[in-house]
Image (cartoon, rainbow, N blue to C red):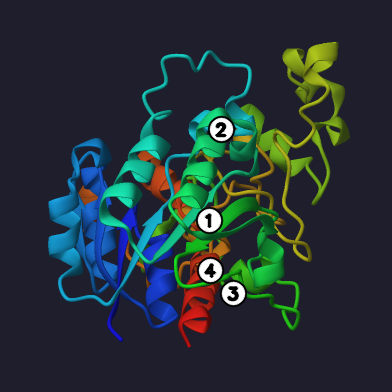
Amino acid sequence: MTVKVIDLFCGAGGLTHGLQLAGLDVVAGIDLEGECRFPYERNNKSKFIEQDIAKVTKEELLRLYGDASVKVLAGCAPCQPFSKYTQGKDKADDKKWPLLYEFERLIREVSPEIVTMENVPDVTKHKVYNDFYNSLLKLGYYVWASKVDCVEYGIPQNRSRHVLLASKLGAIELVKRDDVILKTVRDAIGNLPPLEDGQTDPNDILHRASKLNPINKKRIIHSVPGGTWKDWPKELIAACHMKSSGKGYASVYGRMSWDKPSPTITTLCYGFGNGRFGHPEQHRAISLREAALLQTFPMDYIFVEDKDKFVIRSIGKMIGNAVPVELGKAIGQSIKNHLE
């Protein structure tokens, strides 16, 4: 039996890497973001195709699958339209809304034996998801879908995701990991060299801490692990937080706790003011290497070719948008178990 996978919206390769660790052959990753090509191809035995999913054809995918007896199509469409972090914003013109329909189109045209999708839990509240789910049923797929807590899969991060698995071959479900020990921030990043804010590890360009301005340096010095800005002296509290409308943002300017999982790693996790992204004890925000480790990328995963091409916002986006590698591995193991 020849099993081949194509990873749509592949990004820097979190899902692909996990699937390959599980022993699956990912023949290609497709994404519109060309900057993902280097990390994707550098770290994975797969080719990167820079293309808009809306322009991908049935013929292209069938050519990539070649002689595969089992075709697996994975698609983790950009989650911003469905995310709670963007709720309240006007999304009527968001060009990412149709992407799940494009994924459904390719499933309909190519008829892969197995389909998998990962997204934010709130995706299930939207018509586009319900249309997608019902289309799979009409096409003859057995469908399993559920909210998944990443900590249950050895990921040191409080990150909830919606995972869907569908198969034309019979019932399928995500493997359960009852034997997993809770992983913490300390487990993931406790051994990395210390940094000052604004400093870069000479041996690892990704282990770089953003420079703090003087007031934020004072704020983080007064921050305690697991605490909030309410722990600061009054003169350090931002005016917006003093208002009733700002009192709900307790995690902003927060520190992580060593012996708990991290908060959800976002695309802006390298900024102290963007969430609970303060290092547990050092006076700085976490580095991008630390963020990648919390997303369960291996320590040797390379995101940028050289320091001249280092763009913090771009790499932060790759890391924050990625499927955690260990979740990808669990999805891959589920597919392998299903085929045995």
SS state under label 1: helix
Q: Residue at x 44, y 49 (%)?
A: 76
Q: What residue type is labelled 1?
A: Ala
Q: Do the residues labelled 2 and 1 touch (CB within 8 Å)?
A: no
First in sequence: mark 2 vs mark 1: 2
Looking at the image, tell me whether mark 3 or mark 1 is earlier in sequence order: 3
Residue at (58, 49) in percent of width and height: 265
**What residue is rendered at 36% in x and 78% in y?**
24
Observer able to see residue 36: yes
Q: Name the residue under label 4.
A: 193
Q: Distance between the residues labelled 2 and 1?
A: 22 Å
In the image: residue 161, left or right of residue 166: right
- Residue 258 versus residue 159 in the image, above or below: below
User: Horizontal placement of 144 versus 224: left or right?
Assistant: left
In the image, what residue type sits under mark 4? Pro
The tag on residue 191 is 3
* Contact check, label 2 and label 4, Cβ < 8 Å: no
Give the distance between the C-alpha atoms of the residues marked 3 and 1, in whole angstroms.
Answer: 14 Å
The secondary element bearing badge 4 is classed as: loop
The residues tagged by marks 4 and 1 sit, at their Cα atoms, a distance apart of 14 Å
The residue type indicated by label 2 comes to Phe
Please give the label number shown on residue 82: 2
| Nearest to the observer: residue 27 or residue 183 | 27
Q: Nearer the viewer, mark 2 or mark 1?
A: 2
Instruction: Point out the frontmost of discs 2 and 3.
Output: 2
Disc 1 designates what residue?
A: 291
